[in-house]
Image: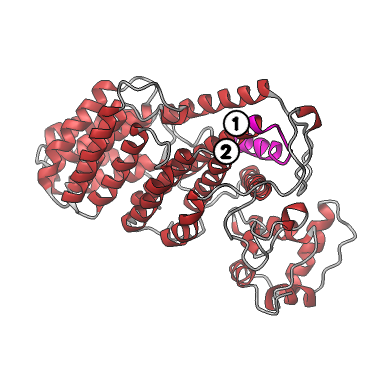
Amino acid sequence: MTGEPNTRLSDLFGMAGWSKGELARMVNRKAAAMGHSQLATDTSRVRRWIDMGESPRDPVPEVLAALFTERLGRVVTIEDLGFGRRGRTGKRRAAGKEENPDGLSWAPERTAAVLTEFTGMDLMLNRRGLVSAGAALAAGPALTGAMNDWLRADPAPAADAPRTDTPLTADSAGYDRYDTAPIGSDEVTALENSVDIFRKWDAQRGGGLQRKAVVGQLNEVGGLLTYRHPAHLEQRLWGVAANLAVLAGWMSHDVGLEPTAQKYFVIAAHAAREGGDRPRAGEALSRAARQMVHLGRPEEALDLMKLAHSGASEGALPRTRAMLHTIEAWAYASMGRGQAMRRSLGEAEELFVSDRNVEEGPGWMAMFDEPDFHGMQALAFRTLADHDPAAAALAQQHAKKALGMRNDGRQRSKLFDFISLASACFIAGDPEQADTYARRALVAMGETSSHRTWDRLRQMYDLTDRYVDDPAIRDLREELELVMPRQVTRTKGSQA
């Protein structure tokens, strides 16, 4: 007991709208349903949790997390409630002290526990149809401040249980014993192959159709990581976890679950760092930056990009660094800073060209190829065109190059290119060409499950206002109004 109010629990309690007596009764009922019939909580104990900072004994934190998750329709973890972890992971003072559960750096056991708990809660929301975006995104400084030194430091060693060279003697990491056995090299290879399949599905159809499958696979990997494995296998498992967490985050962003996406990006950065892959950790943070630009928060995106550059600098291939610069350029473009945007794109082009004859990089960089490079440039120039219409011509050039190079497996990227191209044509005063590309975007729209496309389509729709006297554009507007959701929940400047 700290004697100080638990502000995290208090805030969530206020949002839930319960009385202390109601929460006590629900804890007892929920605990019984989870197999803990001996639990007996009362109003005074709930008051001590909230007002005096008392940490309840297990299994109460898990019960509370489940109750708040169901009530609020979003993932609420034990640490979101302001409670620290116990058990062997709790022996590490640096791995999330009770008074500072978000303290960095995380121990490997804690990363695995957070990963498993968060994905488990996410799956529960999916099963019960409670998924919502009703939570607040963390501000960029809240992410970058704590992670700045941590990303460049060495990972925290495991708490205890020395490693072994044989998977047959692998040992449980100790927080929540998982009901699977340690695995070997063949199983890890199968998991790595599954990441490639999920990544291709996402690129082809968007995040809506496969998000639950990715989260479920990530939950399984988190359970595996609660066991000790030989160092070479554990490093590969952390790599799988990082890749799946990035995908889960990207798919969540794609369907509008912004706070959930942000959490997955942070988990991915932790997992990549545990696996010794700092470039991957930096790329995970760059995804969070792209999310911030999309939501109209470019200043925070630039803060995240500084951290991504810093964390990925050691060992990052030129193409990886080029990709980071394109995201940085998009952030500058959304602020109307054309000179800074062009400087970033120039650096990206030099790095990208220098990497063309280098051996193929990691699988997670496979999607950033030449057409994607042009697609990002098209997006940056189209965004800048809102401030400087002269940039629309360059947006058209890059979008056309991207479309000419796209293969059939990148339907969502093609759709974004069509929207960028149509928008640039509207800005440049060419409604006839804009109408052509906008209709191609509408045709492609039915082949994906990406909510982000609706956000971009809404921005394109707004550009048609100046051409309402054109019969073709009036028809286009009517078609767009028929297919677009009545309310687009994520608009520029949104806090999600």
Secondary structure, mark 1, is helix
Q: Quadrant of residue 49?
A: bottom right
- Amino acid type assigned to the residue bearing label 2 in the image: Gly
The local crowd at label 2, few if under 14, some if 14 to 19, many if 20 or more residues have their Cα within 10 Å, is many
Badge 1 is on which residue? Answer: 236
Please state if 12 lies on the left or on the right of 198 as rendered.
right
Where does the image place residue 114, in percent across and percent down from the top left?
64, 50
Badge 2 is on which residue? Answer: 275
Give the number of the disc on residue 17: none
Please say whether residue 119 is visible from this viewpoint. Answer: yes
Q: Which span of residues is magenta-colored?
A: 212-232
Q: Residue at x 64, y 59 (%)?
A: 94
* 182 versus 156 height, above or below: above
Principal secondary structure, stretch drawn in magenta: helix
- Amino acid type assigned to the residue bearing label 1 in the image: Arg
Please state if 124 lies on the left or on the right of 347 as rendered.
right
On the rendered image, what quadrant is the N terminus found in? bottom right
Please state if 244 lies on the left or on the right of 362 as rendered.
right
Where does the image place residue 362, in percent across and percent down from the top left?
45, 28
Secondary structure, mark 2, is loop
On the rendered image, what quadrant is the C terminus found in? bottom left
Residues at circles 2 and 1 in contact by the CB criterion of under 8 Å: yes
Where does the image place residue 355, in percent across and percent down from the top left?
31, 27
